[in-house]
Amino acid sequence: MTTLFSYQLVAYRTLKAIALMAMPLFAFGASQGPLSDADIRDITQVMRKDLLDKYPFPDVSKRYSDTIARLAAAGRYSHMDACAFATNAGEDLQATHSDKHLRLVCDAEARAQAAAQKSAQVAGPIARDGVREVELQSGLSLAYIDARGHWSATTPTYLSVVNAMNGTATARSVIIDVRDNPGGSGTVGRLLASYFYNVGEEKFYLNGFYKDRSQDEQEWTYAYVPGRRNPNAKLYILVNSHTASAAEGFAFAMQNLKRAVIVGQRTDGAGIAGGFVPLGHGLYMFLPMKMVVAPHSTLGWEGKGVVPDVVVPEGEEKAAAIALVRRSTQ
């Protein structure tokens, strides 16, 4: 393949817990010693209320709440500092019911993450987010789009998608690589998807529901995209076990719409969107609140991942997709 353009990539890892939302600006507090019994009581009360009020599945949120209440009453968290509490309570929640997004963080961890983000900014957001590289293989009329960068809801990320799609608009086959992509904003996947439909053929892409079903949110492909579309291209999406959250949503939606062939291994299984809520005493909880599913359905990829149409060993996804392209042109 000929490289059309590429962006220098810096080492960057995004916590799966923030896969559907960018890290907020935390109001860091002073370092603290062990939490008092009163502190733990306050923290667990806030946790339980948020889980019961906002987690989309009442039976699961009650189990979470009961677990935290029982263990706190038994003294499990006594004499722990905030970071130890975050680690242990987080493990207890996951042991009760595995949700890849639900997570606790303390000030110290948030500081470390913020510092990592700040140092990564030296190369600019486009170096680590969105589309990282585009390659063309003229003999096959094939475009390979490396979209493994975190999908932040930023102008540089959107522009990287626009540039990639406009640069590959004449390709008859397109491979989009979201292996190891931890997710981010679902709007990036919807933007990518929109280029594969004609004007007037907008599709009901995904549906999000909350505990209060009156707040359901329909997500459609966009009626307008900058530049040229490629509605007739054959589309292949590469995934692996580290494809998570919004990147999974892209693969799930395009598979469900029968618009793409998914190649790789079963994805991570993180399908409930959310955001950070403060718990007090230097603690925050990433609270999943919106279950994302197929249109007119309650079926999503939470807890089970996206099963590829073509399952291949790790590391062989790109070669397998190119082989499918060759076969389709014979």
Image (cartoon, rainbow, N blue to C red):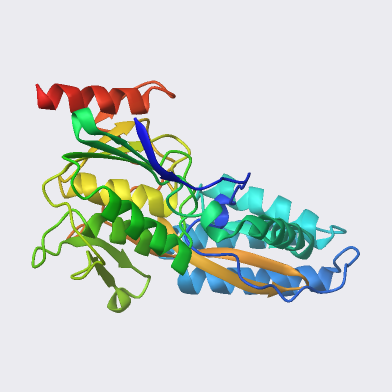
The answer to whether residue 291 shows anywhere in this view is yes
Residue 147 rendering spot, x and y as whole percentages: 41, 46
User: Quadrant of the image for the C terminus?
Assistant: top left
> 52 or 6, which is in the foreground?
6
Q: Residue at x 35, y 75 (%)?
A: 212
Residue at 26% x, 47% y: name it: 168
Q: Is residue 35 left or right of residue 278?
A: right
Number of marks drawn: 0
Q: Is residue 104 above or below residue 264?
A: below
Residue shown at the point (33%, 23%) measured from the top left:
319
Q: Position of residue 12 (x, y in %)?
A: 61, 47
Image side of residue 276 versus residue 274, left or right: right
Query: Picture quarter containing residue 307?
Result: top left
Residue furthest right as drawn = 33
Dividing the picture into quarters, in which one does residue 266 lie? top left
- Front one among 228 and 295: 228
Q: Is residue 108 above or below residue 329?
A: below
264 to 175, vertically: above or below: above
Residue at horizontal 29 percent and vertical 23 percent from the top:
320
- Could you tell me residue 222's position as x and y percent? 22, 68
Q: Is residue 153 visible?
A: no
Q: What is the x, y in percent for residue 1?
A: 34, 30
> Residue 117 vs residue 165: left or right?
right
